[in-house]
Image (spheres, rainbow, N blue to C red):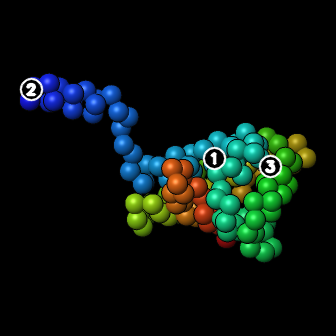
Amino acid sequence: MRTVVGALAVTAVMASPAWAGPEEDALQVVERWAAAFRASDVDAIVGLYAPDATFLGTSSRAVVVTPEEIRQYFERALLNDRPRGVELASRSVAVLADNAVVITGLDATTAVRGGKAVRAPGRITFVIARRGTDWKIVHFHRSALP
């Protein structure tokens, strides 16, 4: 009987997906954010934010606090000057709890304006938290690198 129980336990562990930790889960959100930015996919990028997220984009003149305002920001930012790009050059990850992670770093966005490539280096911060079974961006800040 012990052999059967042991075999079932080993099978269950091998059949279940690997459990990622908070850092890996949060970094996956940032990867999806970057892919949506590069694709100028407003729906995908807005869907990564929690409904109560706070947001300060590079060109924000006020703290953005509603999903509609985040959508408007990305419609202005991503649907013009295409193709758009982003490269996350460096990062630091701080796991605050099993359900909250802060990721800060340096990035560079790219755009095409008037037929010329434009590169804008910046500083970026994501606070990512688990909401139910999903990980969402609950705070975002990006500013130009001086």
Name the outermost residue toward the bottom. 62
Mark linked to residue 143: none
Q: Secondary structure at mark 3?
A: helix
Q: Position of 17 compared to 100: left or right?
A: left
Picture residue at 91% right of the left edge, 47% below the top: 114
Q: Amino acid at mark 2?
A: Met
Q: Amino acid at mark 1?
A: Ala
Evaluate if marks 3 and 2 touch, with contact meaning CB atoms under 8 Å apart.
Answer: no
Q: Name the foreground residue: 139 vs 83.
A: 139
Q: Give the x, y percent position of residue 109.
A: 70, 52
Picture residue at 85% right of the left edge, 55% below the top: 76
Q: Name the foreground residue: 140 vs 121.
A: 140
Q: Give the x, y percent position of residue 11.
A: 25, 26
Q: Position of 73 compared to 12: left or right?
A: right
Q: Which residue is mark 3?
A: 78
- Of mark 3 and mark 2, the one earlier in the sequence is 2
Q: How many marks?
A: 3
Of marks 1 and 2, the one in the foreground = 2
Name the outermost residue toward the right. 114
Mark 1 to mark 3 CA distance (whole Å): 12 Å
Q: Which residue is mark 2?
A: 1
Q: Quadrant of residue 49?
A: bottom right
Evaluate if marks 1 and 2 touch, with contact meaning CB atoms under 8 Å apart.
Answer: no
Q: In the rendered image, is residue 54 in sight?
A: yes
Q: Secondary structure at mark 2?
A: loop
Mark linked to residue 34: 1
Classed neighbour count for the residue bearing mark 3: other residues with Cα under 10 Å, few (<14), some (14–19), many (≥20)? many
Residue 107 lies, with reference to residue 64, above or below; the image says: above
Q: In the rendered image, is residue 85 in sight?
A: no
